[in-house]
């Protein structure tokens, strides 16, 4: 049951659990060795601490009995306007993670919906994300669609 699981916004006090979720997300996806994951923690910790303080990162956590069992983040960043959206900011969903024993209970959907509701209320015209294989169906069921983004990895 998810009735006893509440959703709340994250604070700077939640940085350790947010960092844990990020590392666990990459571990579960098989992305990165221990040294690489340590490097992610080292750069993400001050990033998320600063972002929670200045508002460029907003986090949502699903909590049961005082423990954050799922969470996700929304990055708000400067972006030059476009004809479809002249607003000089964009929103990007990332860092979505659910502890294994709480999966398949709709927590990720609740967190994504909370982020989408917040973005609409703030006047954003869109929100973007990148998905894992496990998350793709969820995002598509919520109306997300692929775009024409391309990427080049430097060697």
Image: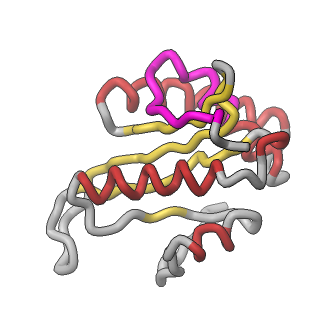
Report which quarter residue 80 is drawn in.
bottom left
Instruction: Tell me residue 62's x, y (percent).
Output: 60, 36
- Residue at 58%, 69% (x, y): give it: 139
- Say whether residue 61 is left or right of residue 128: right
- Residue at 41%, 47% (x, y): give it: 75
Is 96 or 42 nearer to us in this picture?
96
Residue 14: say if magenta.
Answer: yes
> In the orientation shown, which residue stands out farthest toward the bottom?
148
In the picture, the quarter occupied by the N terminus is top right
Colour logic:
secondary structure
- Say whether residue 76 is left or right of residue 63: left
Instruction: Tell me residue 125's x, y (percent).
Output: 27, 68
In the picture, the quarter occupied by the C terminus is bottom right
The residue segment tinted magenta is 4-21
Report which quarter residue 81 is drawn in.
bottom left
- Say whether residue 11 is left or right of residue 64: left
- Residue at 51%, 80% (x, y): give it: 145
Residue 142: say if magenta.
Answer: no
Question: Total label count?
Answer: 0
Against 71, is 122 above or below? below
């Amino acid at each position: 049951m998810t009735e006893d699981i509440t959703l709340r916004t994250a604070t700077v006090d939640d940085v350790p659990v947010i960092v844990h979720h990020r590392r666990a997300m990459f571990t579960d996806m098989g992305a990165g060795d221990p040294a690489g994951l340590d490097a992610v923690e080292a750069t993400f910790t001050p990033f998320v601490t600063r972002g929670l303080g200045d508002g460029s990162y907003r986090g949502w956590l699903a909590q049961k009995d005082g423990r954050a069992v799922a969470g996700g983040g929304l990055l708000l960043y400067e972006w030059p306007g476009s004809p479809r959206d002249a607003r000089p900011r964009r929103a990007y969903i990332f860092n979505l993670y659910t502890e294994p024993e709480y999966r398949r209970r709709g927590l990720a959907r609740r967190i994504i919906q909370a982020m989408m509701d917040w973005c609409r209320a703030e006047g954003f015209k869109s929100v973007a994300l990148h998905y894992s294989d496990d998350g793709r169906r969820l995002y598509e069921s919520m109306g997300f669609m692929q775009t024409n983004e391309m990427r080049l990895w430097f060697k």
